[in-house]
Image (spheres, rainbow, N blue to C red):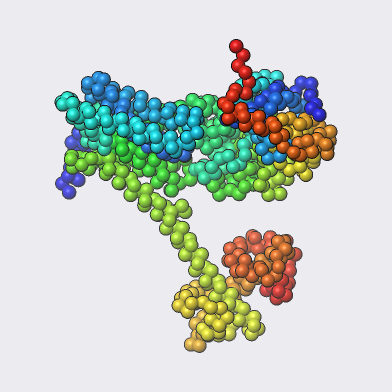
Amino acid sequence: MNDFVEFFSFVDANIRYVTLGSVLLAASSAVVGCFTLLRKRALVGDAVAHSVLPGVCLAFILSGTKNPLILLVGAFVTGWLSLVSIDYITARSRIKEDTAIGLVLSVFFGIGILLLTSIQHSGDAAQSGLDKFLFGKAASLVGEDLIVFSAVAIVLLITTILFYKELKLLCFDEVYAKSIGFPVRSLELLLTTLTVFAVVVGIQAVGVVLMAAMLITPAAAARFWTERLGVMLVLAALIGAFSGIAGAFVSYTAPAMPTGPWIVLIVSMIAIISFALAPKRGWVARLLRQRKNKTQILEENLLKLLYQLGEAHEDYFSNRNLESILERRNFPKRQALAGLAKLKRQGYIQRHPDGWSLTIEGEARGKRVVRLHRLWELYLTQYLQLASDHVHEDAETIEHIITPELEKRLMEELNYPALDPHQTRIP
Amino acid sequence: MILHVEHPVVEVHDLTVSYERKPVLWGIDLTLPAGSLVGVIGPNGAGKSTLIKAIMDLLPASSGYVRIFDEPIKQVRKRISYVPQRESVDWDFPASVFDVVLMGRYGNLGLFNRPRKADKDAAMQALEKVGMQAFANRQISQLSGGQQQRVFLARALAQNADIYFMDEPFAGVDIATETAIIELLRTMREQGKTVIVVHHDLQSASQYFDWVILLNMRLVASGPTEQVLTQELLEQTYGGKLTVLSKVGDLLRKQEFPVREKRS
């Protein structure tokens, strides 16, 4: 708890820097990731992230220092090379893109691990800390590192904002972009370069192994909450920033802990929550919608039945007991009782000692369902030329979803009919 | 029956286009008159979409050249508008109808510039022309097929171009949309615009177009509708595949042969 207060009071200048750095890195890669995701190149980001490792190691071997600028250049070169390789393999051979990505990822990462291991065994004292590139260490974001990586992150953000319109069109409709004279190839190159840079700065905090999650997961989570690209970018940046802070905190309180897995766990939690809870697109919203449909169908079926009983007895408002309801249609008893209780609460039916009766509103709603059912049967026989004994099942579902506007259209097209295909009156 | 015109808006000369080395269009030579409604007609796999894409330089040509308004395409891009096939994009993209129509203005805006008020006005007018103004703020993922097609049309209209290339605008749309679109195309023709439409329905072709291009891997005919839509020419277009032609194409791909010899 003390750690928590100490960290989030931001008194320590070091903590301020580390937090600021993590936020910038995570937010910038999340924003770039939105476009990578929409361009359906999420896996490519993963390949780039893994391919950055040999570049970092090579840069260290050649220069003998851990100067962030030099390491960054090395990372950029191999990251970019991996992308070019993927494109080249896909364009010039029979190998499909997913296979090419797998190939490039494993080959580059393999070389990276090889180089890293040989550096670690070389006994060079300067090498300590190079392994943080594997799983990330946000707390080491200080001094020169912080300045360089933050600068790149800011450049990334500004570039994305500057090219917002172009990137948007590129991701939505590349061919059209080309037709209005957009430099599509250059834009693609730009997006590729942005992706590589986002990966390169992000690995400081998350490490190469899990960097793809930083690029794609915030974007995927944000997509659940909005239908606007602008909002999606901001949301992804916020989600990224939040996990960045969380990662910095973990890295600060438990220095032995690698930051990457923590950040990724947090951002994945946010993604899972988004997947479950987001309005409209979310899983819970879908379940609720289905439940609502189910209860609506049950209630309307009960009302319809009570109305049909009324038709049979030419008396719509008398009491009907449970037996006569279940006799007509085989509802599970518990469901029927629950539905009846709910309809009573809603004021569509009344409860009597010996059964239930329709209220005026209930009669109207039951009548409407019966009418829609028969109208739809008539429509199917007239417009789809279906046999009259084949239309009932269809109408059982459709009767619940026809809107008042559609009902009006149906009435017009059927020329205000009086009888359904079974020669029953349409109420 | 390949009719050439004086002062054409589109001039295609000896155009051959290949996919993965296999030629799908052989030596197309045609000219189109200004202010006409042109239908590109032929069976599946005849290369109709390929032809308009190659004319717009969206696909590389193996040989030949294209001139539009007597200029190379790169110089007249702003006067050309393209309506791609509806299925060519993912409609589950986070954008509203208005966003998509506004994209029609991007070409005039140039890099970095944000859409101005005038661009938004133009986009709104384009939406009105296709009867979709009420849908401006609707998410594109919620549109029906016909509505998607109208949005694409509005995007092209927002460009205020002089020549329009449309890829199957009538495919999979409802009757109301089809009538609305053809009315719109006729109005555009009256304003002196040239509209080139890839079309798959022979029945309506004779009513819709005043110039028809018959295509089946090679150009069968190009001319005024009544002279081109004849029994004989249609049989040439639809009847019997040119087996030798496609066999040669397959060979070119398999042997990795160049479609044209390199001139030294």
- Answer with the quarter of the image where residue A48 lies: top left
Q: Is residue B230 visible?
A: yes
Q: Foreground residue, A130 or A347?
A: A130
Q: Is residue A31 visible?
A: no
Q: Is residue A424 left or right of residue A302?
A: right
Quadrant containing the C terminus of chain A is bottom right
Q: Foreground residue, B224 or B107?
A: B224
Image location of residue A293, percent across then percent down? 51, 64
Residue at (70%, 49%) from the top-left corner? B176
B246 to A292, vertically: above or below: above
Image location of residue B31, percent across then percent down? 75, 25
Residue at (70%, 22%) from the top-left corner? B14
Count of residue discs: 0
Q: Is residue A336 left or right of residue A124?
A: right
Residue extending furthest bottom?
Answer: A354
Image location of residue A144, percent across then percent down? 24, 25
Image location of residue A361, percent across then percent down? 57, 74
Residue at (68%, 71%) from the top-left corner? A389
Residue at (47%, 79%) from the top-left corner? A333
Q: Foreground residue, A132 or B131?
A: A132
Q: Foreground residue, A270 or B137?
A: A270
B54 to A11, vertically: above or below: above
A339 to A105, vertically: above or below: below
Q: Is residue A414 left or right of residue A325?
A: right
Q: Is residue A182 left or right of residue B81?
A: left
